[in-house]
């Protein structure tokens, strides 16, 4: 149960842009669907970093999810990405718990830096010696 960088979006546009930015860091991006059940997702990565896409249709779910996240998974963090037309939602989603808000895939660097710092600081799961050796090998992943 390592900390994962996960994205919940409908189009795939944000994930594609993030993969380009993440390549030098060697961080894997997990796509979890447009409206994941947080309990299922966070069970596998309780200290994960979520990137949630805000749309007109999922705004209520997204705000509720942001409020619930620190109550259930205190080591997890979430950022929100959205179309420019939804920029007025920034302060509401930040108040709900988003650590970052972004409306342009061309300005991903601060989000990527924030996510990588979070993943690097996340608590390591308990592993046996053989599990640590196996995961350190290039083919162990």
Image: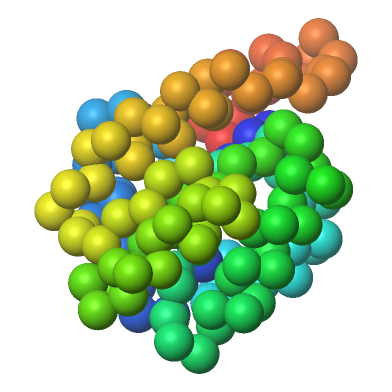
Where residue 29 appears, as percent x and y from the top left, is 45, 49
| Image-quadrant location for residue 129 | top right
Quadrant for the C terminus in the image:
top right
**Is residue 6 something one can see in this rendering?**
no
- Is residue 15 found left or right of 123 in the rendered image? left
In the displayed structure, 23 sits above or below 135; it is below
Give 98 or 92, whichever is nearer the viewer: 92
Count of marks, rendered view: 0
Q: Is residue 55 visible?
A: yes
- The extreme left residue here reads 106
Q: Nearer the viewer, residue 68 or 133?
A: 68
Which residue: 55% across, 74% down?
33
User: Residue 5's x, y, as percent?
Assistant: 52, 44
Query: For the point 44% across and 72% down, which residue is it?
Result: 54
Q: Quadrant of the N terminus?
A: top right
Residue drawn at x 50%, y 62% as measured from the top left = 92
Q: Furthest-bottom residue in view?
A: 57
- What residue sits 59% from the left and 30% below the top? 140
Drawn side of residue 102 relative to residue 28, left or right: left
Question: In which quadrant of the rendered view does residue 127 lie?
Answer: top right
91 and 134: which is toward the camera = 91
Q: Quadrant of residue 63?
A: bottom right
Q: Position of residue 41 (x, y in %)?
A: 72, 58
Structure colour scheme: rainbow
Q: Is residue 119 above or below residue 37?
A: above
Q: Is 80 placed left or right of 34 in the picture? A: left
Q: Residue furthest top?
A: 129
Q: Position of residue 36 (x, y in %)?
A: 66, 71
């Amino acid at each position: 149960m390592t900390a994962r960088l996960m994205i919940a979006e409908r189009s795939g546009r944000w994930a594609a842009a993030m993969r380009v930015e993440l390549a030098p860091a060697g961080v894997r991006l997990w796509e979890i669907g447009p409206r994941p059940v947080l309990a299922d997702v966070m069970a596998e990565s309780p200290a994960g970093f979520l990137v949630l896409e805000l749309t007109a249709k999922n705004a209520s779910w997204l705000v509720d999810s942001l409020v619930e996240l620190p109550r259930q998974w205190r080591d997890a963090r979430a950022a929100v990405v959205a179309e420019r037309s939804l920029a007025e939602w920034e302060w509401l989603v930040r108040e709900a718990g988003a650590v970052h808000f972004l409306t342009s895939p061309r300005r991903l660097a601060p989000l990527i830096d924030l996510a990588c710092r979070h993943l690097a600081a996340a608590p390591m799961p308990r592993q046996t010696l053989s599990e640590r050796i196996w995961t350190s090998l290039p083919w162990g992943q």
